[in-house]
């Protein structure tokens, strides 16, 4: 017996166009009512995956199920989904009302109910009163709101969003992002969101699917993806990262000791290993990754308030003020390392000697 | 408030006037250059088009009686609209032009749709093929049709041998022949103007229609067709006005059986030497074409479709 209801299930989807493998064995489950984001660089296959679910892309191998029904070769107009496009895609020769009515009239909904549902949908996206405008008479943000209403008014089984915010300016994007999250929870429709913007993905999603070169790198909640990336690609793609290199010196249960250079050693938690190979032996060449905000600068003379396992001397090379924080570049073991620091002391200047420390559990390790 | 020093003010005043004069000077130059560049064409059009047209207009208001008697009147126009032969000719011209428009629209739209849907390479090839009739001289093209459409010619024999009909209709020197010839000549204009407007349709609109539940037919009817209306209108206007004023094809393919107005006007001027009456016929043809085209475009740009045409 199945305990978790999967609204979408994709099994072994493979697609090749010419010599390019666009999707190379995609397996994915989308749970009922969740907001799932497909995240990745351009050309990673995220939009293709969405098009496979929508029915716009015919696949070479694999199966697609929506609400338990096999839809692999069913055309998009028989799938009963809702979709919002990057370019709004409102019908320019129809008013807002007619745009919303298009899907309803095809579903043969009685006229009275249609009117009620259109009103509700417009109310949901706060566009009441603009029913008789043509798309050309609306701003970008308003057009995208109407597009969302048009997708929702037919009460779709799934809501597909294909980079809906990337044509909007930064402030509007932020506003509409929150709006989409609110709407999705209010309506409770299972939603698949495609984006290349990691901030968008982290703030919106229940779960994130990170894709690269036609395969899924990792599926997880935003915190899992950010804090415990499974692969080197995921770590580098999301957030900023510092990279160090070294050799495994000793392994003892919970901790691994890495020698960066003669006499310089750092500790890493052994469970923080990324990549396909998850075992170490002494002498292995490894790469170490740590995020700028996990590093902390302390004053050289002050007594350590927090006990860090890794604590080293470094000198400040550059300081950039970002408004909400300082981005400080340090010279650590002869390498440039970025630190994100919420506060700075007055004597931290370029050239100053400081102590930088971090927790072994915050450092990720991958075999070369 | 801090006082403004005398020399500062001087400077400010001088600055602003400098800008104004500089701009004025530059504009002057620009106009001279534009005028020089346009002059050859403007002179050509004025000398060989505008003046003759005005002369013909002037001629059309002269009525001749007998050998020497000539006076200003609207008699030529009155004569045209009271003589049933000329009214029939006008009606024939309009009818054949409308048939040509309908035939080229029905044959052209699917081609334009294919061009919009196919890959850029195929599209280039198709564009070349579509435009190819324009590479052949009108006379040569018409004589080609001549051979095919002759009584008992290739098309007739084909119709009989396929058992479609035993007494095939008269193709040459008939309205059908003229419509065939004109459609063949003007199809490229129809196809290319529809295709251009189809290229401009955002492909995601069709996707949006599909995901909302519209099958291919419904999507075409509700989205593609209305949005290609500007192309249809410009194609119809082009083909219609060109058919109205076509001379060679009606003369060759229709002969005396299909006296379309341009042929009649030519006949009046060249064969009967009635220059003034021929001029009046030309202006009536021009006027009626303009009126019909204007009414048609006004009708199409009404209501919701005004949005599409913007």
Image (cartoon, coloured by chain):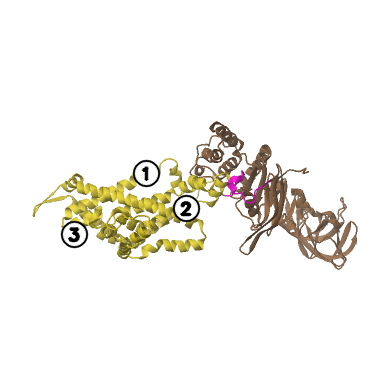
Chain colours: A brown, B yellow
Q: Disc 3 sits on a residue from what chain?
A: B
Q: Is disc 2 surrounded by few (<14), some (14 to 19) or many (20+) residues within 10 Å?
A: many
Q: Disc 1 sits on a residue from what chain?
A: B
Q: For the residues marked 3 and 1, what is the alpha-carbon distance in whole angstroms?
A: 37 Å
Q: Position of residue B120 (x, y in %)?
A: 51, 61
The numbered mark at residue B270 is 3
Secondary structure under badge 2? Answer: helix
Q: Position of residue B232 (x, y in %)?
A: 41, 50
Kindly indicate whether the residues beneath marks 1 and 2 are on one polypeptide chain.
yes
Q: Residue furthest right?
A: A252
Kindly indicate whether the residues beneath marks 3 and 1 are on one polypeptide chain.
yes
Residue at horizontal 37 percent and vertical 55 percent from the top? B164
Whether A287 is drawn above or below A145: the answer is below
Which quadrant would the C terminus of chain A be assigned to in this image?
bottom right
The boundaries of the magenta stretch are A69-86
Residue B123 is a magenta residue: no
| Quarter holding residue A235 | bottom right
Residue at horizontal 87 percent and vertical 60 percent from the top? A256
Left or right of B43, for residue B6:
right
Residue located beneath label 2 in the image: B198
Residue located beneath label 1 in the image: B298
Q: Position of residue B26 (x, y in %)?
A: 40, 58
């Amino acid at each position: 017996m199945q305990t978790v209801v999967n609204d979408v299930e994709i099994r072994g989807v493979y697609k090749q166009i010419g010599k390019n493998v666009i999707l190379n064995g995609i397996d994915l489950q989308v749970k009922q009512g969740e907001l799932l984001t497909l995240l990745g660089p351009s050309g990673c296959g995220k939009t293709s995956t969405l098009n496979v679910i929508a029915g716009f892309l015919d696949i070479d191998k694999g199966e697609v199920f929506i609400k338990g029904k096999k839809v692999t070769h069913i055309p998009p107009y028989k799938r009963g989904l809702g979709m919002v496009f990057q370019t709004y895609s409102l019908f320019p020769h129809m008013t807002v009302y007619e745009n919303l009515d298009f899907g309803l009239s095809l579903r043969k909904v009685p006229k009275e109910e249609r009117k009620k549902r259109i009103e509700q949908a417009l109310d949901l996206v706060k566009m009441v009163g603009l029913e008789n405008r043509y798309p050309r008479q609306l701003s970008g943000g308003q057009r995208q709101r109407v597009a969302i209403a048009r997708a929702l008014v037919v009460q779709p089984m799934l809501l597909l969003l294909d980079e809906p915010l990337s044509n909007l300016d930064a402030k509007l994007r932020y506003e509409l992002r929150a709006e989409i999250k609110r709407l999705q929870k209010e309506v409770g429709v299972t939603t698949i969101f495609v984006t290349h913007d990691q901030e968008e993905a982290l703030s919106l999603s229940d779960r994130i699917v990170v894709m690269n070169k036609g395969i899924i790198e990792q599926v997880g909640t935003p915190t899992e993806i950010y804090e415990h990336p499974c692969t080197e690609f995921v770590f580098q793609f999301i957030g900023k990262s510092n990279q160090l290199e070294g050799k495994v010196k000793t392994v003892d249960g919970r901790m691994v000791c890495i020698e960066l250079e003669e006499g310089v050693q750092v500790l890493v938690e052994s469970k923080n290993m990324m990549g396909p190979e998850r075992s170490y032996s002494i002498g292995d060449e490894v790469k170490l990754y740590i995020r700028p905000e996990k590093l902390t600068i302390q004053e050289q003379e002050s007594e350590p308030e927090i006990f860090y396992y890794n604590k080293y001397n470094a000198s400040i090379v550059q300081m950039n003020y970002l408004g909400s924080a300082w981005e400080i570049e340090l010279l650590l073991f002869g390498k440039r390392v970025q630190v994100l620091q919420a506060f700075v002391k007055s004597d931290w200047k370029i050239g100053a000697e400081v102590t930088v420390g971090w927790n072994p559990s915050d450092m990720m390790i991958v075999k070369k | 408030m801090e006082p403004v020093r005398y020399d500062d003010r001087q400077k400010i005043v001088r600055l602003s006037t400098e800008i104004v004069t500089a701009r004025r000077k530059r504009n002057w130059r620009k106009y001279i250059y534009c005028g020089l560049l346009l002059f050859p064409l403007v002179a050509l059009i004025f000398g060989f088009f505008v003046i003759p047209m005005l002369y013909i207009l002037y001629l059309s208001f002269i009525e001749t009686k007998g050998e020497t008697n000539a006076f200003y009147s609207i008699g030529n126009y009155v004569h045209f609209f009271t003589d049933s032969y000329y009214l029939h000719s006008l009606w024939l011209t309009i009818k054949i032009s409308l048939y040509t428009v309908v035939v080229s629209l029905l044959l052209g739209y699917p081609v334009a749709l294919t061009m919009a849907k196919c890959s850029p390479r195929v599209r280039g090839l198709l564009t070349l093929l579509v435009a190819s009739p324009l590479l052949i001289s009108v006379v040569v093209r018409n004589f080609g049709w001549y051979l095919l459409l002759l009584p008992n010619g290739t098309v007739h024999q084909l119709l009989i041998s396929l058992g479609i009909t035993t007494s095939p209709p008269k193709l040459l020197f008939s309205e059908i022949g003229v419509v065939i010839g004109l459609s063949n000549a003007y199809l490229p204009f129809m196809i290319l103007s529809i295709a251009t407007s189809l290229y401009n349709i955002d492909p995601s609109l069709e996707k949006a229609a599909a995901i909302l539940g519209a099958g291919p037919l419904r999507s075409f009817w509700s989205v593609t067709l209305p949005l290609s209306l500007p192309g249809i209108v410009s194609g119809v206007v082009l083909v219609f006005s060109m058919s109205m004023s076509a001379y060679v094809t009606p003369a060759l393919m229709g002969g005396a059986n299909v006296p379309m107005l341009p042929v009649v006007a030519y006949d009046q001027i060249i064969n009967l030497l009635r220059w003034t009456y021929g001029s009046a016929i030309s202006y009536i043809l021009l006027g009626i074409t303009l009126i019909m085209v204007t009414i048609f475009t006004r009708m199409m740009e009404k209501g919701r479709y005004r949005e599409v045409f913007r």
